[in-house]
Image (cartoon, rainbow, N blue to C red):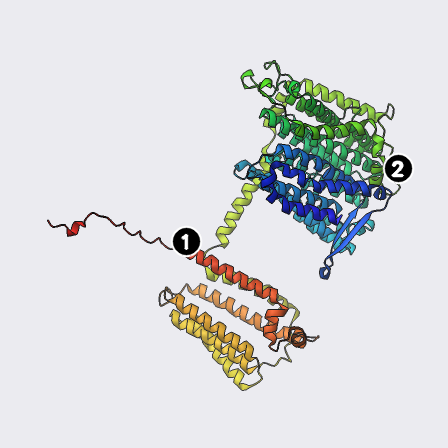
Amino acid sequence: MLAVLLLHAALAAATPALSRRLGPKVFLLAALAPLAGVVLLVTAAPQVLAGEALRTVVPWIPGLDLWVALRLDALALLMLVLVSGVGFAIFVYTAWYAADDAKLARMVWMLTAFAGAMFGLVLADDVILLYVFWELTTVTSYLLVGLDDEEETSRRSAQQALLVTVLGGLSMLLGLIALAQAAGTSRISEILADPPSGGVVPVALLLVLLGAVTKSAQVPFHPWLPAAMAAPTPVSAYLHAAAMVKAGIYLVARFSPAFTDVGWWRPLLVTVGVATMVVGGWRALRQHDLKRLLAFSTVSQLGFLMAVAAWGTPEAAVALAVLLLAHGFAKSALFLTVGAVDHAAHSRDLRRLSGLRRRMPVLATAAAVAALSMGGVPLLLGFVAKEAVLAAVLGTEGVFPAAAATGLVVGSALTLAYSLRFWWGAFGDKDLPDQDPDAAPASGTVDPDAVHGPGTGLVAPVVALSAVSVLLGVVPSLADDLASGVSAAYPGAEPAHLALWHGINLELVLSLTALAAGAALFAVRAGFAGAQERFARAVPAALDADRGYAGTVRVVDRLADDVTGRTQSGSLPVYLGVIATTAAVPPGAALLWYGVDLSGTVLVDTPLQLGVGALVAAAAVGAARARGRLTAVLLLGAVGYGVALLYVLQGGPDLALTQFLVETLSLVVFLLVLRLLPRRFPPSVHRRAQVVRAAVATAVGVFVTVATLAATSVRTRPGVSEELLARSAPEAAGKNVVNVILVDFRGLDTLGEVTVVLTAALGIAALVLTARPPRPARPEPSDEPDPAEVPR
């Protein structure tokens, strides 16, 4: 598992350089990464499906108890079928789809990196590792959606996807950490084996689910997914059909066996899922762009998957396994179909496409199979999955299961309607534009005779993915072992027995009802489109998720502007005062509340220290009251030199030397700057402001003094200084412990500080050189005499 993960990383790093020589065929080389995942799942399947999970644990940061813990069980194996199996087909497809342009190198490493991140996500067995891969998929998705960074639409869509999914990811991180703390372990398998309860666990679960519903585009967070269709079509097929959007479904399916007994788990998630299924299907029927139609259909099917994943029974787990396979194969095939049609006809508008089935019969047939499978037509995998879902839901008694089944039937009817609309829009004959609501005027229709064939490289992956839907639809028992392995996470689960025919029962009646309703809805799509338009105009703006997202962004922007305008006043004293007050007042109040015992504190060792301290205090007061800038700087220097004298009296000559050098350098810099400033400070500020500044300074000074004395008076263990002294000579061969600390014990910190200072210096130099006015150009020498020298 670790080797396959590292292969993804290696190919992501190597393929950009090779893209110049190989062109788009570099994706065939990159396809070795998902192919390795396919080899892994094939070789590991017998052992995993026998009930033995594979594990790999590698130290990451042992001091923080962080490990690269990977675990391959039946659910992860199912996800690898989509991540690596479907991913391999999409990589091969992209080798013929991608253009040989400047974006090729970026696209190949981003897509390969995403494949690796998704591979790690489904195998991660540690909450922190899961979050790392989760956010890697978010970042790579953001980069892929915004691949065409010169287009404003791409940039805006990428930003929307990033904002929504990162919001969910951060909440998920908080929830996972809270669950790990409550369970006493960060291993996901151990948390689920002995799930915690009570306390913060319900809140933690809600935070985790927020990450799941945002990632899987559930209502009301779904608008980011249709917007993400700005990405290239293979990216949409992989990320937004087969892999990334399934991450939230995977998370719910992973946690359902342990937390389905939580009272609100099933009602909340199933309601969200059914609502998403209906809303997505409704919106899909209004789209004219084939890719956006598939985007909203993906939203609809993700709602279907969410409802099934959250149902929390062994039968529902079996149905989920089949439904994941059915949707992954069908939807990725349809997205690749859109890419092939767009590549050949240079249009995705279903009102302009007509008669393409005659120009590309193989692609049209494969797309018909995928569309009908998604619609749940018999003899295809989608039908088997839909019947399994209805059987699992109706197998639970109560009013809520009946209501959920009704919602799923409505969603299934919409699914067949938009599936038929997709195929008809892409390949059907639209010869009667006045009678066909999906047809544009004849002048705008793409001439089928002018459309070239899409090519074998674009058609073969679609045919392969559709063929799997047929094979598993006719012989569904081939998926028995995989579905049984997924359901084995539930106590009392029995082996699955998938079949195409279970006799005449309620599930079959509901399936046929949904098919009939979907076909009728497609037949009357003209009148239904008008009803949709009237409904859209009647819906309040507050219920429109797209307008809700835009309004939220505007409110946040205005709030940020208002807060920035009020807090960023441009006054350095105000900034320093706020920072100092924040740092001093809360801990100072805690010291006052709990009390501090300073009875044993020794304030002065020798009278000489008292004299130097008095001089330091007098110099500080003089600097605060000085009216001339030079006077204030010299008094500040006196304060620093006085502190250096205290170091000498305390027995620290090396610290005193460092203080002398720093103070001298600071004094020189101050004096250099003073040349550009007025000699005296501006007139004094208002009396009230002076009182506030004095109060803040006094409070901070008192707090720092008391906190320092309190910290030194409560020591119960030997100080770290003794350990540093003991180790400096034998480990670092140094006699000056300060130098040893800076160079050896915290050498990387020192290097980082030096780097920061150097970077800041380079930035300042660049700004100064940029702001410097250009020198006047010297006049070119001329043979003409100077007019002043010409005699009159």
Q: Which residue is mark 1?
A: 770
Measured from the top left, where is residue 498 in percent x and y?
85, 31
Residue at left offset 60%, top offset 28%: 343
Crowding at dot 2, Cα within 10 Å, few <14 / some 14-19 / many 20+, comes out as: some
Q: CA distance from mark 1 to mark 2?
A: 73 Å
Residue 186, compared with residue 702, is above or below; it is above
The three-letter code of the residue at mark 1 reads Thr
Seen from the viewer's position, the closer of residues 347 and 788 is 788
Tag 1 and tag 2, C-beta contact below 8 Å: no
Residue 646, compared with residue 686, is above or below; it is below
Image check: 48 left or right of 252?
A: right
Q: Which residue is mark 2?
A: 495
The three-letter code of the residue at mark 2 reads Pro
Residue 569, compared with residue 91, is above or below; it is below
Residue 184 - label: none
Image check: 132 left or right of 573?
A: right
Seen from the viewer's position, the closer of residues 553 and 25 is 25
Q: Is residue 627 at all visible to an observer of this figure?
A: no
Q: Earlier along the polypeptide chain: callout 1 or callout 2?
A: 2
When asked about the image quadrant of residue 327, the answer is top right
Residue at left offset 70%, top offset 23%: 362
Residue at left offset 57%, top offset 26%: 346
Measured from the top left, where is residue 149 in percent x and y?
54, 40
Image check: 378 left or right of 143?
A: right
Measured from the top left, where is residue 176 in percent x and y?
72, 50
Q: What is the residue that sits farthest to the bottom in this orientation?
A: 607
